[in-house]
Amino acid sequence: MVAVVQLLSIASQFVFGSSVLQILFGILSILASVGLYRAALRRTQGVKPSFDALTTGDNLGPFVITAIVVGLITYIGFLLPFVGIILGLVAIFFLQFAVFRSLDTGESVAAAIPGSATMVLAAPLPALLLLIVNAVATFLGILLCFVGALFLLPVATLITVHVYRQLRAEQIAA
């Protein structure tokens, strides 16, 4: 799911042509995604998301810092000449669970990034399939003039969190 936010942020650079607007869009998308991510995390634990739970500041600092660092790593990866696309995709692949680790457990960026990479290395096929599902959801959301994203992104987030919980060997509520 983070890949979706990052790809939209990178796409905004090509549309708007401004790094300042891209950074602004990236920060706004990080803040907007907190509620959706919290709702998905709580739903997989069997807790009905409430408005109070979605607006709490629990683990918000580690989440924001981790999201910014992951975004910067991906952005820099995409900018490098000749190998940029490959490095950017590799970064998205290995860091796709970092923000969820920070938001869910309060892990610092120094623990969430290697933790995400370890999760991906432990189960590369599900992580790759998840990346493909998120890319397809992003593509379809863009193709449908971003209106499709209103439905597809929450579904993709729930799928991502479900895989996240599975890779952490946690119980998932029905």
Image: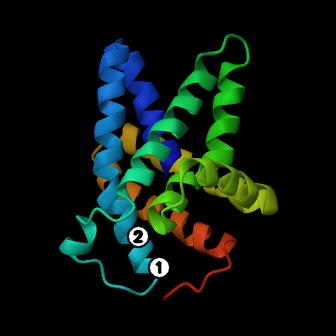
Q: Are marks 2 and 1 in contact (CB under 8 Å)?
A: yes
147 left or right of 26 in image: left
Which residue is found at the position 62% from the left and 47% from the top? 95
Q: Is residue 148 visible?
A: no
Callout 1 secondary element: helix
* Mark 2: secondary structure: helix
Q: Nearer the viewer, residue 102 or 16?
A: 102
Q: CA distance from mark 2 to mark 1?
A: 6 Å
Residue sitting nearer the eye, 131 or 107:
107
Q: Which residue: 70% across, 37% down?
A: 90
Question: In the image, what residue type sits under mark 1?
Answer: Thr
Would residue 37 be seen by someone viewing this image from the given angle? yes
Percent coordinates x, y for residue 164 in the rendering: 59, 67
Q: Position of residue 13 (x, y in %)?
A: 40, 19
- Determine the residue located farthest toward the left in the rendered image: 51
Image: 132 above or below 19: below
| Label 1 sits on residue | 44
**In the figure, is residue 45 to the left or right of 167?**
left
Point out which mark residue 40 bears.
2
Residue 17 appears left or right of 121: left
Residue 85 percent location from the top left of the image = 66, 24
* Residue 9 point in image, percent of width and height: 41, 31
Q: Callout 2 environment at 10 Å: few (<14), some (14 to 19), or many (20+)?
A: many
Q: In the rendered image of this protein, does residue 24 appear above or below residue 141?
A: above
Q: Is residue 134 left or right of residue 30?
A: right
Kind of residue at disc 2: Ala
